[in-house]
Amino acid sequence: MAKLTVSDLELEGKKVLMRVDFNVPIKDGVIGDDNRIQAALPTINFVLDHGGKAILFSHLGRIKKEDDKKDLSMRPVAERLSNLLNKPVIFVPVTEGAQLEDAIAKMDNGSVLLFENTRFEDVVNGEYVKRESGNDPKLGEYWASLGDEFVNDAFGTAHRSHASNAGIAEAMHKSGKPVAAGFLMEKEIQFLGEAVNAPKRPFVAILGGAKVSDKIGVIDNLLDKADKIIIGGGMTYTFYAAKGIKIGNSLVEEDKIDVAKSILEKGGDKIVLPSDNVVATSFSNDADHKVVEGDIDDGWMALDIGPKSVEEFKAVLKDAKTVVWNGPMGVFEMSNFAKGTLEIGEYLGSLTDATTIVGGGDSTAAVKQLGVSDKLTHISTGGGASLEYLEGKTLPGIAAIDNK
Ligand SMILES: Nc1ncnc2c1ncn2[C@@H]1O[C@H](COP(=O)(O)OP(=O)(O)OP(=O)(O)O)[C@@H](O)[C@H]1O
Ligand SMILES: O=C(O)[C@H](O)COP(=O)(O)O
Ligand SMILES: [Mg+2]
């Protein structure tokens, strides 16, 4: 069903609440890759060009304790956004209260404001209360009260039912205010929709990265859709554990080993695991490292897939007509463990006959860093969101947008 979009709204002089996904890789206040910020610019510029007041907000990282807030302020994002838009961005270092309300009241038409990380609301007075990520209706109502219209352009967060996307939308509906999709949201739905509804086959999914407990369920569901599922990166070792292969100190989610077992039983040879890995003595680029096949001894951790696995994965990908990739094959941020991700990325770039879609904050950063992003069909800003969309799930962030 067609969704209401930002171009359907009356914007002049309106306070336009905009949920964006600015959950970018960030370390010590330095942004690693700003793809997600860039991807939201068309919608932001559209609102500004039409005389709207753009009130932006996003989560950044995960906040579970007070201390997490130190490194996860939105301030560096506001600075980057200001550079990209080439105009000032009013940064408000709080998520509610008089300071925010006053700043909004003072906004001129065509100006931009970004307030602090919405997940700061997850920890209040030192307690992990999850107001944002548990979708506390009071918080959604409060944020909804700050604006006239709500534009959701945060495709990357659409699989979450949080106060800042689903909660606000519900409150807007109750008060008769419109909820529309931004251009990025619209584009992502269009692109991924084709891959879900009628994938050209063989359809191969590649799952890696580190969010094992989040994404392992997706693999289970993708079994019905994909022809092959390649597992790599940090996702691998929970599956190794399920198969009784030794994993040393590699990343593992103990309480998902049973899920991995049942996926392996159900999937049979649809599931492709790496046969060798680059293992290291510690989580550091300077650590001693070597390639091993099969068992990983105690004192070693796997940080990349090995060369044999790369060749095996390429053989599976060779005839693919649709490839969806989420999650790097190794700790690509460290040069000694980037090779698996690089080689798979380059190989995908060479598959000119296939639709190749990469999703995920770090995965996107990886293909950009490695210089292969131009050769891929679509770079999605969604990680978990693109996967759940591909599974055919209804995403709460999308469901909450008004139909036309
Ligand atoms: N073997 C491994 N051990 C530990 N971490 C790994 C391993 N392989 C990859 N990673 C890490 O996984 C992280 C990325 O995983 P993640 O699931 O966040 O992917 P993503 O593309 O960012 O998706 P999303 O947008 O859902 O977060 C990287 O920081 C990378 O270093
Ligand atoms: O990076 C993502 O996938 C989204 O921004 C959601 O973040 P989350 O996995 O921390 O909820
Ligand atoms: Mg990530």
Image: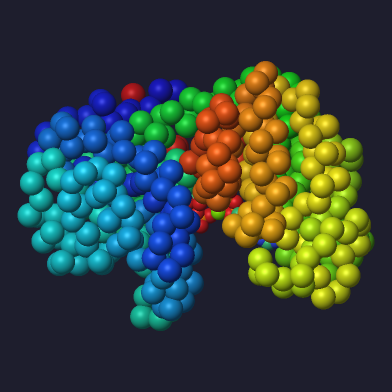
Q: Residue furthest bottom?
A: 126
Can you see residue 79? yes
- Image position of 312 (left or right of 24): right
Disc tally is 0
Q: Nearer the viewer, residue 61 or 121?
A: 61
Identified at 89% across, 38% down, the residue is 269
Where's the C terminus, which quadrant? top left
Can you see residue 388? no
Question: Looking at the picture, how far across and down is residue 390, in whole percent?
Answer: 61, 34
- Image position of 377 (left or right of 164): right
Identified at 46% across, 76% down, the residue is 65
Q: Quadrant of residue 122?
A: bottom left
Colour approach in the figure? rainbow
Identify whether 82 is placed above or below 347.
below
Question: Looking at the picture, how far across and down is residue 231, in whole percent?
Answer: 76, 46
- Image position of 87 (left or right of 32): left
Question: Looking at the picture, how far across and down is residue 20, in whole percent?
Answer: 36, 46
Identified at 77% across, 31% down, the residue is 317
Q: Quadrant of residue 38?
A: top left
Q: Nearer the viewer, residue 319 or 101?
A: 319
Question: Looking at the picture, how far across and down is residue 219, in whole percent?
Answer: 72, 44
Where's the N terminus, which quadrant? top left
- Image position of 104 (left or right of 181): left
Identify whether 174 is placed above or below 184.
below
Identify whether 314 is placed above or below 101.
above
Identify whether 176 is placed above or below 32.
above
Identified at 24% across, 50% down, the residue is 82
Q: Nearer the viewer, residue 228 or 362?
A: 362
Q: Quadrant of ligand 1?
A: bottom right
Q: Nearer the viewer, residue 142 or 174?
A: 142
